[in-house]
């Protein structure tokens, strides 16, 4: 009986180990394989040497984000039976975070796992590849735009012009402002020196009288510590707790529950692969790679949301951080700057305008209902034409 039980347990264990990989493989090709005859392509794995890809992330080592990135790299290898292997590197390990775009474009290394909001100077449409002030503000809305309203095709065209293949969006979190001084109203932003990721996000705060500074995540802590800046926007509670922001910045500035983050409520990441590298990956492995990115997006987002709940407790109880919520009136004062800034950044390229126009139609739809055409006005109330 003992031996029989052992054998059954062995079979069961084998099935459990295979189930996750098999399920994800099936999901990757569910649409394309429906009409196929015989074995689907992803089961015909080549006996060739594994393809190895070097990928750097924008996450600093020691953060939850980097842990999730490492798990993603491992899953790609599991899903492809070791035929596609990702060697992951933390922020700054190969090049600086803001140098990754050009490095992957040139083939210095193969791929990057980064925030699209860093690249409007390279591809103006990047302004609209992640959330921006008072635009689409829910993760499901961005998923819909990317998957069904042409967003993914726009992103692939933009990065493709720079020798990179855009795989897909990766959900992360909303963003917080950590401050060394209390900021309790719209008016109190004036005169402060605050780190932002640049672009339209920095513009809306500059309109409110803020002096903005562009810094990668790894430089935020020392800048706060030395008093170079008064405050900094940088991702959510869990990662910022990992980075120790609560030790030196005793205030977190948020909006009201209706608008917890006014400038970037859905901070998206993505993965881009050098086109030469991408084109040498067989089609069935490309499909599995894309499926792994979808899994990673869901896993990273939900893991960080759970960790945020715990991190807020630690920030407040362990580090004495005060959470300050702005009022609806404060948000209204910021919102009036948004339409002219949207159009200013959309006009930077035809592709940026195409992306924004599609999002504007989505925001005006009965489904969303955030705006009407009457809301597209400048600071004097004059209509703005797209």
Image: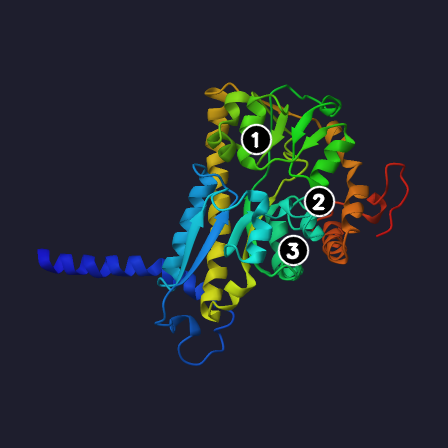
Q: What is the x, y in percent for residue 351?
A: 73, 58
Mark 1: give few (<14), some (14-19) or many (20+) Cα within 10 Å.
many
Mark nearest the camera among 1 and 2 is 1
* Residue 262 in the image, given as x and y percentages of width and height: 68, 36
Residue positioned 47% across, 41% down in the render:
65
Mark 2 or 3 closer to N-term?
2
Residue 236 in sight here: no
Q: Mark 2 points at which residue?
A: 135
Question: Circle 3 sits in a helix, a strand or a loop, which is it?
Answer: helix
**Local secondary structure at mark 2:** loop
- At horizontal 70% and vertical 52% (from top left) the residue drawn is 125
Q: Is mark 1 on a helix, strand or loop?
A: helix
Q: Quadrant of the N terminus?
A: bottom left
- Per the image, the residue denoted by label 3 is 145
| Residue that mark 1 sits on | 220
Image quarter for residue 68? Answer: top left
Q: How far apart are marks 1 and 3 (CA)?
A: 32 Å
Asked if disc 1 and disc 3 are in contact, CB closer than 8 Å, the reply is: no
Residue at 77% of width from left, 29% of height from top?
Answer: 208
How far apart are the alpha carbons under marks 1 and 2?
26 Å
Q: How many labels does the image show?
A: 3
């Amino acid at each position: 009986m003992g031996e029989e039980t052992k054998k059954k347990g062995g079979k069961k264990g084998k099935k459990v180990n295979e189930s996750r990989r098999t399920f994800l493989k099936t999901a990757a090709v569910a649409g394309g394989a429906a009409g196929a005859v015989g074995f689907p392509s992803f089961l015909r794995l080549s006996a060739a040497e594994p393809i190895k890809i070097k990928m750097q992330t924008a996450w600093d080592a020691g953060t939850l984000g980097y842990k999730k990135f490492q798990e993603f790299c491992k899953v790609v290898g599991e899903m492809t039976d070791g035929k596609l292997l990702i060697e992951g590197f933390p922020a700054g390990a190969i090049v600086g975070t803001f140098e990754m775009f050009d490095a992957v474009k040139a083939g210095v290394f193969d791929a990057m796992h980064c925030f699209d909001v860093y690249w409007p100077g390279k591809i103006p449409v990047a302004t609209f590849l992640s959330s921006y002030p008072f635009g689409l503000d829910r993760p499901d809305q961005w998923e819909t735009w990317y998957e069904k309203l042409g967003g993914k095709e726009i992103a692939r065209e933009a990065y493709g012009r720079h020798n990179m293949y855009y795989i897909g969006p990766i959900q992360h979190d909303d963003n917080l402002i950590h401050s060394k001084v209390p900021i309790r109203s719209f008016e109190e932003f004036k005169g402060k020196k605050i780190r932002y990721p640049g672009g339209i996000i920095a513009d809306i705060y500059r309109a409110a009288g803020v002096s903005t500074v562009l810094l990668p995540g790894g430089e935020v802590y020392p800048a706060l510590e030395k008093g170079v800046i008064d405050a900094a926007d940088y991702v959510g509670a869990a990662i910022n707790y990992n980075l120790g922001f609560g030790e030196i910045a005793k205030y977190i500035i948020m909006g009201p529950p209706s608008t917890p983050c006014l400038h970037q409520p859905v901070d998206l990441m993505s993965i881009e692969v050098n086109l030469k590298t991408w084109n040498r990956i067989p089609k069935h492995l490309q499909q599995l790679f894309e499926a792994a990115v979808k899994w990673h997006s869901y896993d990273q987002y939900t893991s960080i949301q759970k960790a945020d709940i715990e991190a807020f407790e630690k920030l407040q109880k362990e580090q004495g951080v005060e959470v300050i919520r702005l009022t609806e009136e404060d948000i209204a004062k910021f919102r009036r700057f948004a339409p002219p800034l949207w159009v200013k950044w959309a006009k930077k390229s035809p592709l940026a305008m195409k992306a924004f126009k599609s999002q504007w139609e989505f925001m005006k739809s009965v489904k969303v209902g955030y705006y009407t055409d009457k809301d597209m006005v400048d600071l004097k109330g004059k209509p703005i034409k797209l």
